[in-house]
């Protein structure tokens, strides 16, 4: 996965161990290149059949800013 997203294996291990975080750009790149669910990358849960309110409610506080940015980006795209 790291190769597809232009990351090194050491960085992937740091992410898996919780020592590093993915940027919003890398989350979107993972979605575009690998069809990985951004909600899963942010919350650890799949968003199938979940409302946006549920996703926000269950999202770790440190990742809520990412969800807020995605929400703003979606509003712009839907105009």
Image (cartoon, grey):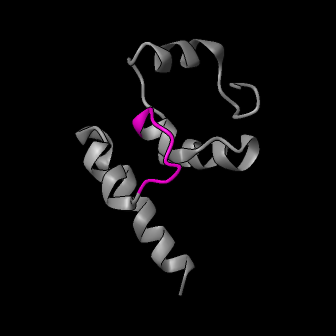
Q: How many marks?
A: 0
Question: What span is in magenta?
Answer: 43-50
* x and y, in percent, of residue 3 in the image: 75, 26
Q: Tell me what residue is drawn at x 31 percent, y 59 percent.
A: 53
Q: Tell me what residue is drawn at x 56 percent, y 77 percent.
A: 77
The answer to whether 43 appears left or right of 62 in the picture is right
**Residue 49 covered by magenta stretch:** yes
The furthest residue to the front: 49
Judged by its main secondary structure, the magenta piece is loop
* x and y, in percent, of residue 62 in the image: 27, 39
Q: Quadrant of residue 36?
A: top right
The furthest residue to the bottom: 79
Decide: is 14 above or below 72: above
Decide: is 14 above or below 33: above
Front residue of 67/53: it is: 53
* x and y, in percent, of residue 54 in the image: 32, 53
Q: Quadrant of residue 4?
A: top right
**Residue 37 covered by magenta stretch:** no
Q: Tell me what residue is drawn at x 55 percent, y 81 percent.
A: 78
Q: Tell me what residue is drawn at x 42 percent, y 23 percent.
A: 20
């Amino acid at each position: 996965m790291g190769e597809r997203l232009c990351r090194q294996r050491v960085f992937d291990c740091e992410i898996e161990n919780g020592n590093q975080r993915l940027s919003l750009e890398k989350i979107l790149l993972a979605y575009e290149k690998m069809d990985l669910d951004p909600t899963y990358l942010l919350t650890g849960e799949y968003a199938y059949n979940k409302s946006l309110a549920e996703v926000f409610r269950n999202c770790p506080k440190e990742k809520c800013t990412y969800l807020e940015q995605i929400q703003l980006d979606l509003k712009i795209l839907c105009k």
